[in-house]
Amino acid sequence: MVMMERWKGRVALVTGASVGIGAAVARALVQHGMKVVGCARNVDKIEKLAAECQSAGYSGTLIPYKCDLCNEEEILSMFSAIKTLHQGVDVCINNAGLAHNEPLLSGRTEGWRNMIDVNILALAICTREAYQSMKERHVDDGHIININSMGGHTNTSTAPRNRCDCYDGGTETGVREAKTHIRATCISPGIVETEFAFRHHNSDPERAAAVYESIKCLKAEDIASAVTYVLSAPAHVQIGDIQIRPVEQVS
């Protein structure tokens, strides 16, 4: 991807970079020569991935950073550290997300609060801080990418909307209203074979496995390819929304 050349040596933040889509995105960006700050609550797997990237001879660097996205102070400290060590963020990949099996009529408030903290508030805080980082350094070609879900586009009375409605459209609108050339994109995958289902159905691993056995699922690398496609678009091209699902997925 020739257009990815312009991102060489520049800084990307990938949240939830320890496993699944986040790890695949971090690897892809390092492969294309970016300095990638990969954050998660547990950085052991990111440290292992960083060593793998180095051994593979990738031209970029993966920097593990321990951060609990439920804690705003930790998020702000992370952005402060990135500013001190790497000047700031040029690309922000809001990937971290989770789902608890907590239905509206019987779920626990604690589970709802955790989902709101990670899926909505952390995304909003990271978006704000990334934009401010770009603005103060006069970076006018930065990019904010939110990894959402096809579930956010389901229009039924029983399916709760997720961060798609809350912030993805708002991110693009916000950067346009700010009169910048910073771009914002939402990527909404369907079923991707990661650890997500096993965490969602943590008390029923057979049910989780069945999610991935029923059809030929997307791979985390498919979503990473979508991210590099978006980043490689010419500077005058705004890709607002990508919906991607397995061919066999019905809804």
Image: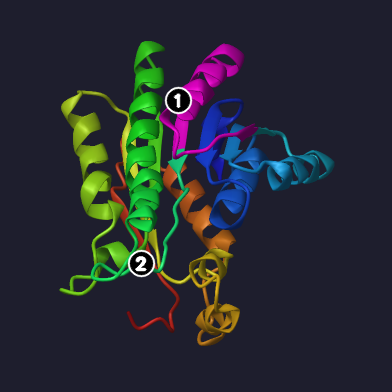
Residue 67 percent coordinates (x, y): 56, 34
First along the sequence among labels 1 and 2:
1
Front residue of this view, candidates 162 and 26: 162
Residue 78 percent coordinates (x, y): 53, 25
Q: Quadrant of residue 94?
A: top left
- Whether 87 is among the magenta residues is yes
Q: Which residue occupies 65% across, 46% down?
A: 27
Going by the numbered disc 1, the residue's amino acid type is Glu
Q: Quadrant of residue 238?
A: top left
| Image quadrant in which the C terminus is located | bottom left
Q: Are marks 1 and 2 in contact (CB under 8 Å)?
A: no
Residue assigned mark 1: 73
Q: Residue furthest right?
A: 55
Q: Categorize mark 2 by other alpha carbons within 10 Å: few (<14), some (14-19), many (20+).
A: some
| Image quadrant in which the N terminus is located | top right
Front residue of this view, candidates 119 and 48: 119
Front residue of this view, candidates 4 and 28: 28
Badge number at residue 102: 2
Q: Which residue occupies 51% across, 21% down?
A: 77
176 above or below 103? Answer: above
Q: Categorize mark 1 by other alpha carbons within 10 Å: few (<14), some (14-19), many (20+).
A: few
Residue 52 percent coordinates (x, y): 79, 46
- Whether 111 is among the magenta residues is no
Residue 103 percent coordinates (x, y): 30, 70
Q: Is residue 103 left or right of residue 32?
A: left
Q: Which residues are magenta?
A: 65-92
Q: Which residue occupies 48% across, 67% down?
A: 200
Q: Residue furthest bottom?
A: 214
The total of numbered circles placed on residues is: 2
Q: Quadrant of residue 47?
A: top right
Q: Is residue 126 visible?
A: yes
Q: Is residue 34 visible?
A: no
